[in-house]
Every structure is written in C-alpha cells, then in structure tokens.
Image (spheres, rainbow, N blue to C red):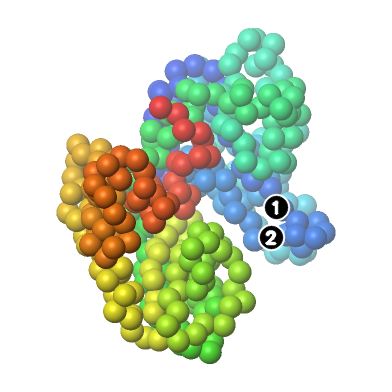
Amino acid sequence: MFAEKIYVERQKRLKDQIGSGIILLLGNEESPMNYPDNPYPFRQDSTFLYFFGLDYPGLASVIDVDEDKECVFGDDLTVDDIIWMGPQPSLKDKCQKAGISDTSTRDRLQALLKKAAEQNRKVHYLPQYRAENTLKIESLLGTHPTAIKDGASEVLIRAVVAQRSIKTEGEIAEIESALDISHEMQTLAMKMSKPGMYEREIVGAMEGLVLSRGSRLSFPTIFTVHGETLHNHYYGNEMKEGDIAVNDSGAESSLHYASDITRTIPISGKFSQRQKQIYTIVLNAQEKAIEAVRPGVEFRNIHQLAYRILGAGLKDLGLMKGNIDEAVDAGAVTLFFQCGLGHMMGLDTHDMEERYGRLR
C-alpha cells in the first residue's frame, strides 16, 4: 500500500468533487474456476484499490459526502477460515492503513443504503463489469440489472477519471517497476525465439519469469506469428525461418500498476530486407511521435502525425498509392494501423478506457 495520507487525500478530493450524497464503491469477490474452493487468482477492483488500497475480497465501502465519513464493510475471518489461511489481520487493522477508522459487517450495508433512500439521498455508484457486482447493486439498491448501467453516476465517473488520469510520482514509480519486468519478458522472448520452437514455449517462459519476480500478468499474453489477428491468444503455431512474431505482453507491479509493451521479433534472429523496411517505418513514426509529445499538445495530433508518417513510408514502398493527406483523411492507413498510437497506463492496462464509458 501507499502511505496512509495518500488514501486520505484521494478520498477527500473525491468528496470535494462529488459535493453531496453517498458514494458506494464495491470491491471484488473471489471468482471460482470450476467449483467454489478453486478460485481464479484474486484481483481487486482498480478504483477500490485506488481509494482504499485494500487488496482483499469481500469488501465494500461507503463515503458519506455530507457527513464527511468513510466506512468499509466486510467480515473478519472465522475460525474455520483461519485453519485454512492462518492468522490474518482484522478488518479494522487493515483499514487503518488506508486512514479508515470506521468499519462494519457486510450485513449492515443494506440498512445504511435503505436509510439513505428513505431520506432521498443520492447514491453514486460506478458502472459494473462483473455480473456478481451488478447483482449486488440490484440487491442493495433495488435497481433492476438492466437499469444499473444507465443509473451509474456520471458525476462520480468524471471525478474518478479526473483523479486516476493524473499519476503521482509514486504511481509512476510503480508503472516503471512493472516496465522493468516487461523489459525482462521481451528480452527473454528475443533470446529464446528460433525456428522449430512453438509459441507456447516462449509464452510459458515469460509467464514463469513474471511469477518468479513475485508479479502477475497484467493481461493475457499475445505472442504469435499471426499478428494480423490483433488479440491472438492461440500459442500452438510452430515458428519457422522467416517468420516474425508479435509479442504484446505486460506485468503488474506489487501494487497492481500495469505495463504493456509490444515488440516484433524476427524468428530467424534477423529481419529480412522487406521486414527491415517496414520496421524502420514504424520506428520512425514512434520516434517522431515521442519528440512531439509535450504539455498542451492534444494526443490526437500526435496520433495524426504518426498516421501520416506511416502512410508516407508505406507509399514509398508501394504499399499505398495516391495523395497521402487524402488517404489519411479517408482513414485508409487504418488498414495497417488499426489500434491507434497508444493508451493510458495505470491500475488498468488500458487505464480509464471503456470501463467508465467514453464521456466527453
């Protein structure tokens, strides 16, 4: 966790931005793979982590803006739980590290929200991406699941996006630590890849490296000689002389900040002349885009710059024809550049993208 004051400041800023009402933030639950006692590795909700830092399942929080109070709801482990998991800190002890002194059991959350409804107080919540939390909202607020998305608080969405979009030095350090692992992953893949090997051998080695660093993947690895399929999670291809492989992979820091790096690897150890020409066009676009980044410049303009450089390079190779400006305006370069230039990084691999909608 970060220092206690970090979470206190984040919670205060959120209250100031919302102005009134109650903010309901749900943590995630364990998600079983095939039966209840065999769950997937637990991953806490990113916004819950951002404001509370509590990396445990079964928690929810209420921030009462009007009364300037915060409470985390959860249950302490039973004796049976402790037999399996060993001694664990109490909920109150955990919450104190996030500056939260008020805790309560999960069964008291609904009563608090019911009282707020009776008082006609606004309950702000975010869009949900897990079915169990959608059903939890239905149970707590009496909102039909089909109406929960539309009922999400726009003012809360905007406030969360505004805070999480600006990274502190501590957050940047976390992203950098995740990038250090990414560097090792990419380097390992480059050294290992050779004709006759299967993609899965490289993927397995990278994931093993991540686990050995006490980390986890930030998203399912894309490593394929069929990079024309953008999100290709099939690893069964044998790599051959002359192939190139796309390695789109990343890891998480200890506090769950993500890295995401994509590189292209020549399986033969060296690009062919044609491959080198394409690679050089992409490298030039990347370098010129990096040079153009500065405060006050809209990212879409950086994207357009890269777009035009790629188009011009492809025309020089005979892969595009005609007026490049007209081709760019018509979106023709999108045939070769589907993903765009980049995306934000943070607690989510595509930070603040899609999860809370494209608010403008």
The residue indicated by pointer 1 is: 30
Residue at 23% in and 62% down: 316
Indicate the position of residue 319 as horizontal and vertical percent values.
Answer: 33, 61
Q: Position of 78 compared to 237: left or right?
A: right
Residue at 69% in and 11% down: 118
Which residue is more in the foreground, 85 or 118? Answer: 118
Query: How crowded is the residue under tag 2: few (<14 C-alpha within 10 Å), some, or many (20+)?
Result: few
**Labels 2 & 1 near each other (Cβ < 8 A):** yes
Which residue is more in the foreground, 85 or 259? Answer: 259
Q: Earlier in the sequence, mark 2 or mark 1?
A: 1
At numbered mark 2, what does the secondary structure look like: helix, strand or loop?
loop
Q: Quadrant of residue 203?
A: bottom right
Residue at 44% in and 46% down: 351
The residue indicated by pointer 2 is: 40
Query: How crowded is the residue under tag 1: few (<14 C-alpha within 10 Å), some, or many (20+)?
Result: some
**3D distance between C-alphas at marks 2 and 1:** 7 Å
Indicate the position of residue 227 as horizontal and vertical percent values.
Answer: 48, 66
Q: Quadrant of the C terminus?
A: top left
Residue 76, above or below 261: above
Residue 172, above or below 136: below
